[in-house]
Image (cartoon, rainbow, N blue to C red):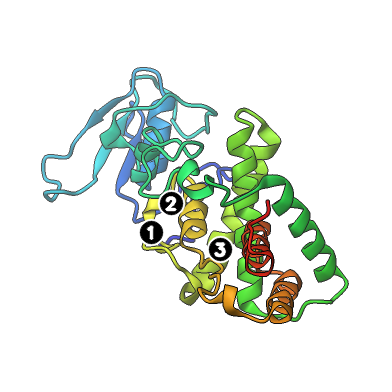
């Protein structure tokens, strides 16, 4: 069975991908059954009243083979929504991790927390939202060229903004839906363009199986920041102003970076930083 094949134990509407060969056999009290991947077999077992688990005595060491046996006389192949969880050994790695992670806080993920990724003015919701709206308008009318780096930066900024908004509004289903959708879009892009990834853990890692939102924080934290020239105060004022004007025209420069650059130029020209 490949990752794209359908597990025989899976309901047609179940979107969960199969992650390996059919290492589980689900059987009823009469011994009738079918093979399935470990994830779907465990879910079916959890759906059956009185079901029991038997490890095969001749299974190779370290294998995931289990026999799921139903105590009732019902064939256990119907799909049950919200089936209760079973023992960790009966579930997939992603399911086990999902029980010990929190995408909203970052708990259980090897990635920066929302505070570390977005705090200290690194992402201003109002300014970033307005900037992305302007860029979206420019993109829709064809003002921006088709540059893969710019496309990726747009996806990252959009995902980071959606994630930050979901963090600031816990329990809001729409914000969470937007955060998940934009995070998955970034993850999908980076899987096709791994050369653009900046963080230490790649987009294909199982680290992000429970949620792609912490991946967004990793990439936002690793995103190159605008570097203010160290000798800006020695520049000709008109050159400094031209540099600032060019930054305003660059859609990859964030509002927070523009604010920093503006303060630096004001300090260089006026000799006193202005907020």
Which residue is identified by label 1?
A: 205
| x, y percent for residue 116 | 45, 46
Callouts 1 and 2 close, C-beta under 8 Å:
yes
Q: Residues within 10 Å of mark 3 (few under 14, many from 20)?
A: some
Residue for point 52% across, 32% down = 78
Of helix, strand and loop, which one carries label 2? helix
Which residue is identified by label 3?
A: 188
Write down the quadrant of residue 30 in the picture: top left
Residue situated furthest right in the rendering: 141
Query: In the rendered view, does 140 fall on the left or right side of 177?
Result: right
The numbered dot on residue 208 is 2
Of helix, strand and loop, which one carries label 3? helix
Q: Relative to residue 77, is residue 179 depicted above or below?
A: below
Q: Residues within 10 Å of mark 2 (few under 14, many from 20)?
A: many
Query: In the rendered view, does 96 fall on the left or right side of 158?
Result: left
| x, y percent for residue 183 | 58, 53
Q: Relative to residue 120, is residue 79 depicted above or below?
A: above
């Amino acid at each position: 069975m490949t990752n794209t094949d359908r597990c025989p134990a899976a309901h047609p509407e179940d979107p969960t991908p199969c992650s390996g060969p059919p290492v589980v056999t689900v059987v009823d009290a009469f011994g009738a059954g079918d093979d399935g991947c470990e994830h779907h077999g465990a879910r079916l077992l959890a759906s059956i009243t009185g079901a029991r688990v038997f490890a095969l005595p001749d299974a190779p060491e370290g294998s995931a083979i289990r026999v799921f046996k139903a105590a009732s006389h019902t064939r256990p192949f119907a799909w049950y929504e919200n089936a209760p969880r079973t023992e960790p050994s009966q579930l997939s790695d992603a399911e086990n991790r999902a029980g010990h992670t929190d995408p909203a806080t970052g708990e259980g993920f090897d990635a920066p927390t929302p505070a570390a990724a977005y705090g200290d003015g690194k992402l201003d919701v109002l300014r970033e939202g307005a900037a992305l709206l302007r860029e979206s308008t420019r993109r829709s009318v064809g003002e921006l060229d088709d540059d893969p780096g710019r496309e990726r930066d747009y996806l990252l900024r959009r995902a980071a903004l959606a994630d930050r908004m979901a963090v600031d509004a816990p329990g809001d289903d729409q914000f969470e839906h937007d955060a998940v959708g934009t995070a998955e879009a970034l993850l999908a892009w980076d899987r096709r363009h791994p050369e653009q990834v900046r963080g230490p853990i790649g987009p294909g890692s199982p680290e992000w199986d429970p949620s792609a939102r912490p991946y967004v924080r990793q990439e936002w934290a690793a995103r190159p920041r605008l570097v203010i020239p160290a000798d800006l105060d020695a520049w000709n004022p008109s050159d400094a102003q031209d540099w600032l004007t060019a930054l305003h025209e660059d859609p990859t420069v964030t509002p927070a970076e523009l604010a920093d650059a503006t303060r630096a130029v004001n300090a260089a020209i006026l000799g006193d930083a202005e907020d």
